[in-house]
Image (cartoon, rainbow, N blue to C red):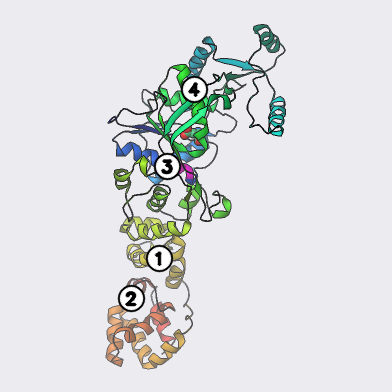
Amino acid sequence: MHPGATTAPGAAPVTRFAPSPTGELHLGNARTALFNLLLARHGAGRLLLRIEDTDAERSEEAHTAALMADLRWLGIEWDAGPDRPDAQGPYRQSERAALYAAHLARLEAAQRVYPCFCTPLELELSRRAQLGAGHPPRYAGTCRGLSPTQRAERSARGLGATLRFQVPAGRSIEFVDLVHGPQHFRSDDIGDFVVRRADGSAAFFFSNAVDDASMGVTVALRGEDHLTNTPRQLLLLEALGLPAPGYGHVALIVGSDGAPLSKRHGALSVREYRERGFLPQALLNHLFRLGHSGAPPGLLTLPEMAACFATRHLGRAPARFDEAQLRVWQKDAVHRLGADELVAWLRPLLPAPAAGPGASELARALQPNVVLPEDARPWLEIVFGGAPPLEPGAERVVREAGAVYFAAAAAAAREHAGDLAAIAAAVRAATGRQGAQLYLPLRLALTGRAHGPELAPLLKLLPPGVARERLERFA
Ligand code: GLU
C-alpha cells in the first residue's frame, strides 16, 4: 500500500479542483468541483482552486476567468486560488515553473529521469508496431540506455528532448481508491513517461502530483479517466519523497441513454444552462445526485449537501445526466425564489411597463407557471400584446356567458380598471353567477386561456382601457 495514500483520521481535509483552462466549465468538471467543495466543507477543511495551465498552447486566460465566474455563479467558493493567494500558492501552474524545475533537478541528480530525443513520428511508429503485435502501446525505452556521449551528440545536433521518468521494473503499485476500492497495477505495464515537455514546461503527471504534495492536498477527487494515471503519480511522489493525497476517481457522467455525454444530449457547459435561465440551485442538486447516493429528498442548500456528503456514497457506475430531472429541480428552485430574485431572474424579458412596482406582483403571479424565463413569454404577450385569441373550446363558454355578463364586466372595467374584485362583483350582481361560472368567462376573455397565473395581478398590469376592450368584444 502506498504510504502517503491516506489522510490522518480526524484531520481537516484539503481538497482541490484543478481544471485545465482549455475550454468552458462542463457539467462533469462542475460536479468534480462540487464534490471537492462538499468534501472540504463536510470536514471543516479547505478547497483549493488550481489552474493547470502548463500547456501554454491550449490554455487561455479568458477560460480561467470564465471558469472562476461559472464556479462562483454555482456558489462553489474556494479558500485559496489564483485570486486568493496564500503561502502554498501561486495557484496558476504557469507561475510555479521554479518549483517544478527544482524537483526535476532532484530527479535528474538521482538519475530517475533521462532525456528522450524520439520524434513524434518515431513514437507513433513504435506505437503502431506494438498495437500491430497485439501489445498495449507504451514507450519502448529507446532513449533510456543512451550514453552521456550519445546524449551530448544528439543535443549538439539541435534535437529537442523531453525528460522521461524511468519507471522502476518489477514493482507492484497498490492503493485504495476512495471510490473504486483497492487497486493494483504493475510497473512493468507502465512505459517511461514524460515529466518535462520539449519546450521545458512540466508535464501533467508531474506538475499535478508535485502541486498536490506541495499544496498540502489530502484528498483529490477527480474524473475516472485519471485512474490509470495514479500509479504513475504515486511512483513520482515516492521518487521525490513527497506525500500522496488519497485519490478518489468519480464515475463519468453519461447522457440519459447511457452514452457518453455529448452535444446531442443538449447543453454541456454551465454557461449554456445559466444563459437558458437554469438556477444554480437546480444544477447543483442534479449534479450532486449524479453518482452520490444517500441524500435526503428535496432541494438542498450547499451546507445541507455538505452535511450528508461522504466518499463512501460515491457510486462506481456511470451517472446519468437527465435534463427532465434537472427541470424538476428547476421548478422547485424557481418556486423558492424570493420576490427580488424572481424579478431579477425574469428581468431580461420584462417589458418597460412591467418594470415598476408591478414587476414584483407580475413575477409572483407567473412564478407557478414558469420553469424557465422563456415560459413567461406567452404570458407577457397576453398582458402587454394585442387581444389574445381564444383557445379551442373557449368560444362556447364565452358565448354561453352572454352579452349581459360582458356588458356588466366591461362597464365595471371602465370604472374600476384593473380591479378584479370590483369587476367580479358587478358581474355577480348582474348575472347571479358564482365561482368558476363567474370567473372562467372573465379569464377567457382577458387572457384567452382557461388556466394560467392568478388573474388579479395580470389584470392590474393591463394597460389602461385594454381590459375593457377585451371584455367588450363579447358584450
Ligand atoms: N487538469 C486535470 C484535468 O482537468 C486535473 C486532473 C486532476 O484533477 O488531477 O483533468
Q: Which numbered disc, 1 or 4, marks the residue closer to the eye?
A: 4
Residue nearer the viewer, 374 or 185: 185
Left or right: residue 111 compared with residue 308: right
How far, Cα to Cα, is label 1 from label 3? 34 Å
Residue 25, above or below 156: below
Left/right of residue 333 with respect to residue 252 in the rendered view: left
Tell me the CA gap for discs 3 and 4: 32 Å
Contact, mark 3 vs mark 2 (Cβ under 8 Å): no
Q: Which residue is mark 1?
A: 353
Residue 70 visible in image? no
Q: What amino acid does circle 1 point to? A: Pro
Label 4 near ligand 1 (CB < 8 Å): no
Q: Quadrant of the N terminus?
A: top left
Q: Position of residue 407 (x, y in %)?
A: 37, 90
Mark 1 or mark 2, which has the lower sequence index?
1
| Label 4 SS | helix
Label 1 and label 2: CA atoms lie apart by 14 Å
- Residue annotated with mark 3: 71
Give the mark nearest the N terminus, 3 or 4: 3
- Going from N to C along the chain, the mark reached first, 3 or 2, is 3
Q: Which SS does the magenta portion mostly show?
A: helix
Residue 256's disc number: none
Label 3 Cα crowd, 10 Å radius (few <14 / some 14-19 / many 20+)? some
Residue holding disc 2: 418
Give the mark, 1 or 3, whose residue is nearer the N terminus. 3
Query: Who is closer to the viewer here, 290 or 348?
Result: 290
- State the image coordinates of residue 99 (x, y, percent, origin top left): 47, 18
User: Start and end of the magenta stretch?
Assistant: 28-34
Q: CA distance from mark 3 to mark 2?
A: 44 Å
Q: In terms of image quadrants, where is residue 158?
A: top right
Residue 239 located left or right of residue 166: left
Q: Does 245 appear above or below 380?
A: above
